[in-house]
Image: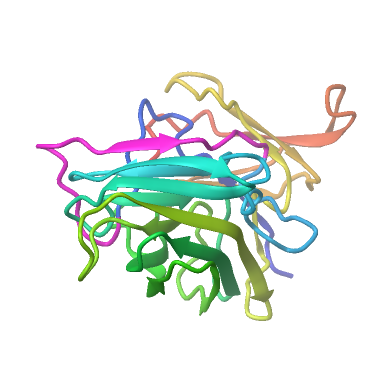
Amino acid sequence: MKKRIVALLLIGCMCLSTSGCGNSKTQDNTEQPATEIATVENTESTEVVEDDGNLLENGDFSKGTAGWGVYTAEGGASTLSVENGAGLLLITSNGSLDYSNQLYYDGFSLKKGGVYELSYKMASSHARKFEIRIQLNGGDYHAYMEETVDLTEEMQTYTQRFTMEEETDLAPRLCFNLGTAEGFEDQVHRIDLDDVTLKLVDDSNVDESVVTNGEININVNQVGYRPDDKKLAIVKNCNAGDVFEVRNSAGDVVFEGKLSEKKHSEAAAEEVCEADFTDVKDYLW
C-alpha cells in the first residue's frame, strides 16, 4: 500500500512580503519597480473544484475580480475591471517586455502526469498577439505550458491541452502576457476575457499517493506566522498518523511530520487532526 502524503501548501505563511509574477526570463526591476495588484481572496484550500470540474473558482468573473491580479513592469500600465459579466483589462501602455502587462490567476494546483485542458473566450479591441502560459510561481518562472495566440476584435474561444510533465505544483500561476508584441504598436486598447476554465481531463497517470490541499480541507493562520510562533494547521477528513509535508513555492519539501490523533473540533463540528510545523523557522519562498 502506498504511503498517503498530505502536502500542506504554506507558501508565504512566514513571508514578510511577496514579489510579482515573471516568466522564464530573469526580471531586473532595480531601475523601475514592478507592481502587482492582486485580488486573491483567502480560502481554506488552494484548489477549488466546481461541479463542472473547473479548477478556477472565478474563471467567469461571477465574483468580480476575486482570484485575479495584474502585474506590470518596465513601462507597462493596465487596470482590471468587470464589464457586462466579463473581465476587462484596459491597457494604456504596452511596456518593453512581453510580460510588462500580465493578467494572472492563482489558487489551483497541477498534478504530475495529469492531462489538462485550458479554455477561455478572449478578444482585443486591436488585433494583436499575446502569450498564454501556466508557470512556476517563483524561482526562474519557467513554463509548464506556453503558447503564442493571435487575438482578434471578435470574441473567440481558445483551447490548449497539455500534460503536467514535472512534479506536482501546489501553487502555479496562470498568466496572460499582454505587454509588447511583435508588430503591435504601443496604443491604448482593451482586452475582454470570460469563461476561463482549467480542467483535469485525464488523471490515469496521476500519482494519487500525494494528497494536496484541494482534496482535503486544511486551515492555516491566514495572517501568517512569526519564526518562533507555535505553528499548527487543522486538517479535516484526515487519518491519524498520515505523513504531511510543508513545501515552498518551488514545490520543495522543507519539513515533514505526522498528523496528530483525531480530536473533536467544536468550531468545525467534526473530527480533525493537527499538523504541527513549529520547527519551520525560515521564511517560506
Residue 259: image quadrant is top right
The structure residue drawn at horizontal position 73% and vertical position 46%, both measured from the top left corner, is 241
Q: Is residue 26 left or right of residue 66?
A: left
In this view, the residue farthest toward the right is 269
Q: Residue at 56% across / 65% down in the picture?
A: 121
Evaluate whether residue 71 shows in this view. yes
Color encoding of the figure? rainbow
The reply to whether the magenta stretch includes residue 1 is: no
Seen in the picture, residue 2 relative to 94 is either above or below; the reply is: below
Eyeballing the image, is 60 above or below 168?
above
Asked if 108 appears above or below 162 in the picture, the reply is above
Corner quadrant of residue 34: top left
Nearest to the observer: residue 217 or residue 258: 217
Q: Position of residue 32 (x, y in %)?
A: 14, 37
Residue 110's spot in the image, x, y percent?
Answer: 55, 63
The residue segment tinted magenta is: 23-44
Q: Is residue 251 visible?
A: no
